[in-house]
Image (spheres, coloured by chain):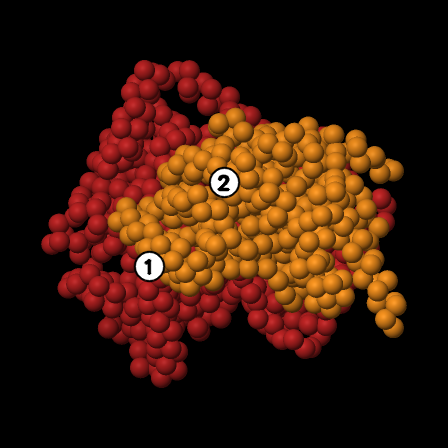
Chain colours: A red, B orange
Amino acid sequence: MAQDGKRERDRPWIMRTYSGHSTAAASNELYRTNLAKGQTGLSVAFDLPTQTGYDADDPLARGEVGKVGVPISHLGDMRDLFDGIPLDQMNTSMTINATAVWLLSLYIAAAEDQGVDPHVLRGTTQNDIIKEYLSRGTHIFPPAASMRLTTDLITYTVDEVPKWNPINICSYHLQEAGATPTQELAYALVTAIGVLDAVKATGRIPESEFGKVVGRISFFVNAGIRFVEELCKMRAFVELWDRVTQERYGVTDPKQRRFRYGVQVNSLGLTEQQPENNVIRIVLEMLAVTLSKDARARAIQLPAWNEALGLPRPWDQQWSLRAQQILAYESDLLEYADLFKGSEVVEARTQELVDSAWEEVQEVLKRGGAVEAVESGYIKQKLVESNATRLRSIESGEQTVVGVNKYVEGAPSPLIENLDEAILTVDPEVDANKRAELARWKMERDNGAVEEALAELRRVAESDGNMMPASIAAAHAGVTTGEWANLLRQVWGEYRAPTGVAGATVKSSPTGAAAQTVERLRNRLHDLEARMGRRPKLLVGKPGLDGHSNGAEQIAIKARDVGFDVVYEGIRVSPEQIVASALEEGVHLIGLSILSGSHLALVPEVVERLADAGLGDVPVVAGGIIPEADAERLRAEGIAAVYTPKDFELDHIMSDLIDLVDRENAAE
Amino acid sequence: MPPSEPDDDARQVMSADKAAVSRALNLVEDRRAESHARVADLLAVLKDSPKAAGGHRVGLTGPPGVGKSTLTSALARSLRQRGRTVGVVAVDPSSIRSGGSLLGDRARMSFDPTDKGLFVRSLATAGEVGGLAYAANSSVRVLAAAYDTVVVETTGVGQSEIDIVHVADTVVLVIQPGSGDVLQFLKAGIMEIPDILVVNKADHDELARRAVADLRGALRTAHAAGADRDRDSDWETPIVATSATKGTGIDELIDALDAHRGHLETTLQTRRRQGEVQWTLDLFSRKHGEHGVSTLGGLATLKARTEQELDGGETPLSLCERLSREYVAALGQTT
């Protein structure tokens, strides 16, 4: 170590911002600006149609094109996205799962077009389908077919794109779905075990090479506000992964056993109320994954302070990047060895987490492993229960959230004086422009070559060959994202994952104020039922491609617990289906949940179709990340109520819903 | 809006108008005393609809988690491909604490929302002991007047399986490989032998084969134990292996359903009549308990009388109403 003030510094982690929106060209501009600001890697956010395998011209893509990310339909888009960005020098993380094989194929094809040898490409494909079934909801195919795509990508890249991280096992979304630290550790590890076992079962990797595959596995982790515990969680991850790789897979090289992870800190805990406070939350959460040198993140991306309000603007993302830069370059953090080695407190908590997580790992393995525990709904139900417990403790005030359930009075924030301008709005023309561009692309390409490439894809899909080479060829031939995915849908079918809500039970104290409130709501519903002759029935619908089902699930469970009959159909249900269900089920009320920002397209469509079906008098409420200006428009179009993240008191929402049914019943 | 005449409503139900079917289902779920007469009238009219007489009522039951919803979905899709219309009643348990329920069956089903020949209704058990909801029986009768095949799907083994016999022409018990309880129940004669046995999730050939063999054994033991003494002995329960997710075995299941429906041709009326008698007795005894039954002369007398009245053209619901009034009057005399 050098003299005081001149200590050697560790190399900082890769700094990224999860970004992309509107079009490939607009996102390219954003990437170049971000790189110029000192960002050291890219993190591509794809829009939902791209993630779920639809082109912009598919009816299901309506309202979703370019919303939560960039639409990439074909090689031309991928070229535009990285125009002027040399791919041999870039480290690109792609949040892509069900269509990961396809997007990586487009990336490789774009690199080849730039004259770059795929062997030098560096980056990450998320490629973790298990957590899609559990939390994020962009899965397409049944588990077996999905695992096959996952392993195809892994076994292909190990030799052909050797610097690539083929999979990022995500504990991130498990925490978003409500996982406790123990559950986050356990379910991420069983996912990794499920993937590695599946890779082994392909027989494509010689025993002697298996350590190489294990060494390429990386993780994508969440860090919440209880940052001491989170810090211990990261240390527990390191220890547990070392154990799994050594004991289960016999990896001897310690470098291949290293727990390599990237982080996006928690978006779930960011508040709509007093949103400026989120900056402090984000910084504390970043500390959890940077303070331990022995368990430090390799890459970090931070959310923006205003994510609970809508889409962040470039300036908002810049503020988060600056937080990383100040910690890495201004502070002395990177000059020291591990700060916590030998700390009794940290080591004891870490050990507790190691033990409890290991126990849950064994439980899932006993149930047949990650895939089986997804299909049976075991893990999903656990997560739904944990999330309900968390929300109830916030609602009851047991868990403090500053500005939400405590210290709510304060001076108005100048940052949101002009609320509509405090977020990014996507040009509504993006959708139509993309459709027109797509039509041009399909006209100008060699359709004979496309047919051939699709035939080859089908042949491979029906065999047990690797999907990567045929997909790269299809990328070069001009095949589109929708064509690739639709073909595989025909071969493998689609999958609707268990919702986990039906069997979920939430522990709550039978006495106290909270229990009394619930009792009052139950009595009101009971009285309403007696007057109506039928128990009030609520349809909870999630239209669009957005798979973030937490809100819908929690409303469904709470509504059941106060006594509604609740019909919940899971994610990705079209407006047409919602109306058909409302008609067949004879519901009294409909609740729609949309978090992708496509509410202005989807909610009115449901309302219109309801009127056409003669159900115009069934009240509709909506929930999601809905800016106030949009909420006003929706109310003007007849939506009975709009709920946003600030409406954390589910009892209030329930009370409103009972009022709505009561009023509608009285009017009849 | 004034309520329209039952005849109008009934006609629309028989023409499978979805809005009318939905309204009729709302009505039969209505527990208010003032609605009972309307329900009885409606069901009396629907009873003689051509669909109801010629159709097929299938009861699908089995323990939780065996994939009944996915199987129902696959079955409905295949039936639609064969040009038959389908009505589904999916029954889920209500929470004992709140009385509310989470009806999740639709989440496992994927259907074309524009299909006029398919109708799915979820129903909560509303806290009743046994798998079948108060309204399920009536709901099946409404759907039977509108659609060729009606599938009523319930969860549970034991009580609901007994309930479902009263409403279904054909009872299908669904299990998955390795579910030992069902085998034990069958062997011990706790559970009646279903008309068709399905081993679902038969994705792994070896496991499925073993499960089918185990079931054959259990059926033999059950025969020996006399568990099928009340059933017709000419029918040998087929065992069908299906994978609802892969779509295999569904055609075989439909063939088995058709075979059983064909087998019933001469006995169907008797079977449905037995079901109606049982339903009437259930409705009455759930309402008034043992005391009610004994006040009206005991179970055997009540059963004989119910058979007679139903033969005379009475319907279960209206008969139950009448029996209730008699019981209440009898109570008045004794106090």
Pointers 1 and 2 within a single chain: no
- Do we see residue A522 in this rendering? no
Secondary structure of residue under mark 2? helix
Figure quadrant of the N terminus of chain A: bottom left
Q: Quadrant location of residue A278?
A: bottom right
| Whole-percent x, y for residue A558 in the image | 64, 60
- Do we see residue B297 in this rendering? yes
What's the CA distance linking mark 1 and mark 2?
26 Å
Q: Is residue A664 left or right of residue A583?
A: right
- The amino acid type, in three-letter code, at marker 2 is Ser
Chain to which the residue tagged by mark 1 belongs: A
Secondary structure of residue under mark 1? loop
In this view, the residue in front, A386 or A155, is A386
| Whole-percent x, y for residue A51 in the image | 44, 40
Figure quadrant of the C terminus of chain A: top right
Q: Relative to B116, say whether A324 is above or below.
A: below
Residue denoted by label 2: B73
In this view, the residue in front, A381 or B125, is B125
Q: Relative to A100, say whether A566 is above or below.
A: below
Q: Tag 1: Cα neighbours inside 10 Å, few (<14), some, or many (≥20)?
A: few
Tell me the number on the disc at residue B112: none
Q: Quadrant location of residue A400?
A: bottom right
Residue denoted by label 1: A368
- The amino acid type, in three-letter code, at marker 1 is Gly
Q: Is residue B104 left or right of residue A613?
A: left
Q: Quadrant location of residue A292?
A: bottom left
Q: Residue at x 38, y 65 (%)?
A: A185
